[in-house]
Amino acid sequence: MYKNTFKTLSILLVSISMVSISSSAQTKGDSNKEYVPDDLELYNEIVNMDTEFFHAYNICDLKKQDAIYSEAIEFFHDQGGLMTSKQGILDATEKNICGKVTRHLVPGSIEVYPIKDFGAIEFGEHTFKNNQEKSDVPSQVGKFVIFWEKKAENWKITKVVSLH
C-alpha cells in the first residue's frame, strides 16, 4: 500500500512540476513576443503625431505644442509631479527645455493601442539629451505613455505619463 501511495505521489509531484515549468516558460515566452500593431493605419498616425509633437518640442515651437495639447491636459511626471495647466506646461517647457534639452525616441519602442470611441494610447521609450553637457555623456532611457484623443480629424494629447 505504501509503495502505491508513494508511486502515486511521486507521479503527481512530477506532473505538477512539469506543468509549472511549462506554464512558466510560456509566460516568459509571451512577454518577449514582438509587438505587432492591431491597426497599422492608427499606429502610423500616432507615430506621425509623436514625430510632429516632439519636433515642435525640440525646436521650441510652443505654438505647435499648444495646438496639440488638449485644454484638459494632465501631465504626470515621476520627478515633477502632476501638472494640469496647459499654459503652465508650456511655460515650464519654455523655461526649462527650450535650447537646453533634446528628446530622442528609442527606435522601435512605440506601441499603439486603440481606445474605442476616444482615440489611442501610445507607449514608448525615449531619452532626453541635456545640450549643456558634453556630447559623450549618456542619456538615461525613460518610459512614457501618451493618451491621444481624436476629435474630427485632429489629434490632441490629453494625458502624459513620463517616467525616467
Image (spheres, rainbow, N blue to C red):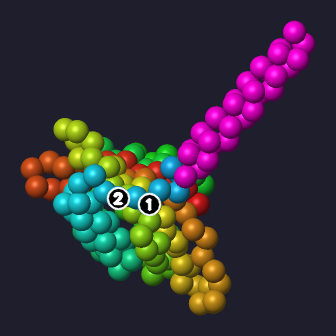
The image shows residue 152 at horizontal and vertical percentages of 9, 50
Report the residue at 31% width, 71% height from top: 51
Nearer to me, 54 or 99: 54
Residue 155 in the image, given as x and y percentages of width and height? 21, 55
Residue 102 image offset from top left, x and y in percent: 46, 78
The magenta stretch is: 1-29
Quadrant assignment for the C terminus? bottom right
Residue 8: in magenta span: yes
Up-down: is 76 above or below 95?
A: above
Pick the quarter of the image with the N terminus: top right
Q: Nearer the viewer, residue 84 or 129?
A: 129
Residue 115 visible, this angle = yes
Q: Is residue 112 above or below residue 98?
A: above
Q: Say which residue appears at 31% left-offset and 57% top-offset.
A: 37
Residue type highlighted by circle 2: Val
Residue drawn 82% across and 22% down?
Answer: 7
- Residue 37 forms part of the magenta stretch: no
* Residue type marked 1: Glu
Q: Main secondary structure of the magenta part?
A: helix
Q: Which mark is residue 36?
A: 2
Q: Is residue 132 left or right of residue 9?
A: left
Q: Dot 1 corresponds to which residue? A: 34
